[in-house]
Amino acid sequence: MPAQMDMVGIVVMDMTRTLPFYRMLGLAIPEGAEKEDHVEVTTPNGYRIAWDSEAMIKGMSPDWVEPQGHRIALAFKCDSPFEVDMLYRQIVDAGYSGYREPWDAFWGQRYATVNDPDGNPIDIFAPL
């Protein structure tokens, strides 16, 4: 059997800032998880997403260095274009960084991008 994609892991600087951000995107992260060095949840569609503190990663890989820039982006699907607009506004109003305000993309989606607390781009979209 070939290997199967099972989990996306994100290294974070500050769990207390990061986990509330991802809760706003609809992930059911248990309250109090901010105290942990490793947190993971399974999404309703069966994917796992995990967050590891920098301290934990450095403990496993002492030569780990914080990356510059990013190489991946996560995308969260909304039910409607209106929901994209509302979620974008909710995230920005909560003090998180908006990167690109909602717009109608030529490929037929309402699209927006925000940055998580570590600067990772997070796309939110819905079919038009």
Image: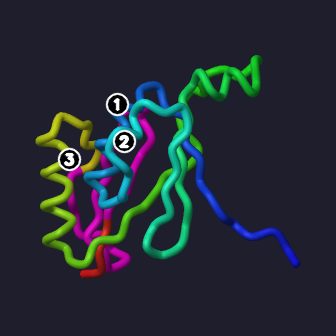
| 10 Å crowding of disc 3: few (<14), some (14-19), many (20+) | some
Residue 56, x across and y down, in percent: 62, 27
Side of 122 where 8 appears, left or right: right
Q: Nearer the viewer, residue 25 or 34?
A: 34
Give the number of the mark in front: 1 or 3. Answer: 1
> Is residue 109 a member of the stretch shown in magenta?
yes
| Mark 1–mark 2 distance (CA, rounded to whole Å) | 6 Å
Side of 14 where 105 appears, left or right: left
| 10 Å crowding of disc 2: few (<14), some (14-19), many (20+) | many
Q: Which residues are magenta?
A: 101-124
Q: Which mark is residue 16?
A: 1
Residue indicated by mark 3:
91
* Quarter of the figure that contains the N terminus: bottom right
* Quarter of the figure that contains the C terminus: bottom left
For the stretch drawn in magenta, what is the main secondary structure?
A: strand
Which sits earlier in the primary sequence, circle 2 or circle 3? 2
Residue 64, x across and y down, in percent: 71, 22
Secondary structure at badge 2 equals: helix
Give the number of the mark in front: 2 or 3. Answer: 2
Q: Which mark is residue 36?
A: none
Q: Residue at x 13, y 71 (%)?
A: 82
| Mark 2–mark 3 distance (CA, rounded to whole Å) | 13 Å
| Mark 1–mark 3 distance (CA, rounded to whole Å) | 16 Å
Structure colour scheme? rainbow
Residue indicated by mark 2:
19
Identity, as a three-letter code, of the amino acid under mark 1: Thr
